[in-house]
Amino acid sequence: MSVGRISELYRSMPDRIARARRKFGRPLTLSEKILVTHADDFESQPWERGRAMLRLRVDRVALQDVTGQMAIFQFMMSGRQRVAVPTTLHCDHLIRAESGAADDVARAIRDHEEVYTFLRSAASKFGMGFWRPGSGIIHQVVLENYAFPGGFMIGADSHTPNAGGLGMLAIGVGGADCGEAMAGLAWEVLHPRLVGVRLTGKLGGWTAPKDVITYLCALLTVKGGTNKIVEYFGPGTESISATGKGTICNMGAELGATTSIFPFDARVAAYLRATERAEVAALAEDARQHLVADPEVVDDPKRFYDELIEIDLDQLEPQVVGPHSPDRGRPIGKLGAEVRENGWPAKITNCLIGSCTNSSYEDMRRAAHIAMQGIKAGLRAKTNFLITPGSHR
């Protein structure tokens, strides 16, 4: 999406948000601000959480090489010659990690040549951005290149909410829904309820952003977020990096949440500048009041959220999840006793850093520092250690 279109969106926000405040008779959460600024005919829609269907206009669409095929077929039925909204196609899901990047990509290209040829030609014909096999994992590439504060996007993958780390409302949908949005139609969704998560304190020691969402998943269970937006706020959000925020929003899918989102802050602005989007950062800084919840919401959140959860990051311990379900979480200190009690295997046999949830440079750097200390101490790895970087940055 061009800087010009982002600027146009930000210019439209004050009037639309003011109209919504008058209509609702109250201040707005961040999620509500984004929903009302992307509403198709705001005044005529019934805004009832959990009951009304909303018609929304998306800023962009993201597709991957498996579910994206259906979206393209659906779009072709519309008869349009070009996509109506910015759309990108990312070839990552058909690559099977086995022996190493070069061999795995070559194998995928050989095994799926017909699919890639179709996707490449469709992207060229209909004006979509095309990310070839080996160029990166869809959600990390979107975070680094396309996500922006206050925007609204849908994607043909359940972990599309990763973009919420930059303050974008991003929802994973089916291929048919993407195809309709690409053809210029409004996208419909049941008005989500809102879960407010107030973060205080700072992450410390070995506690990482992923521990926030695994802890929350244990609280809410895998069904606890169904038809809900999880909105993070509070002073603790500012201590979490942009990619850390992305990790937390990404795994909101494990709650069944419609999506998750963080407010715009200095960490997000720094990330935008680090990824060569200084103009977007400057625009967002000027529009900051529209990219966060209203002050009244932050001061008295119980009045505005359907559910409220508070997490003190100072007290949060590293979490271990499983087996069998992402909502079976516990502090790492309790794992040993549970392993002995249940007779589970006590030996760690595989380690992974990567996937769309933890594939940023920040994730790699932390592990690399530990590995370098191990090398200096003369240690050798005793487990399989797999790394799948999300991009070339």
Image (tube, rainbow, N blue to C red):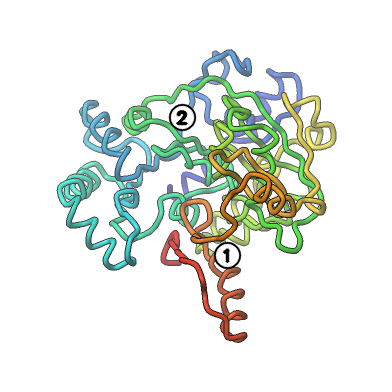
Q: Residues within 10 Å of mark 2 (few under 14, many from 20)?
A: many
Residue drawn at (69%, 30%) of the image: 195
Which sits in the foreground, 5 or 212? 212
Which sits in the foreground, 250 or 89? 250
Q: How many marks?
A: 2
Q: In the picture shown, does residue 96 fall above or below 257? A: below
Which amino acid, mark 1?
Glu
Q: Which residue is mark 2?
A: 57
Query: As drawn, which residue projects farthest toward the right?
Result: 299
Which sits in the foreground, 25 or 225? 225
Mark 2 to mark 1: distance in Å? 33 Å
| Label ID, residue 362 | 1
Quarter residue 28 falls in: top right
Can I make out residue 196 in this image? yes
Residue drawn at (84%, 31%) of the image: 300
The percent coordinates of residue 393 (x first, y second) are 46, 67
The percent coordinates of residue 140 (x first, y second) are 47, 54
Residue drawn at (26%, 31%) of the image: 75
Which amino acid, mark 2?
Arg
The percent coordinates of residue 96 (x first, y second) are 32, 54
Q: Is residue 340 left or right of residue 325?
A: right
Q: In the picture shown, does residue 125 fall above or below 99? A: above
Q: Is residue 358 left or right of residue 33?
A: left
- Element at badge 1? helix
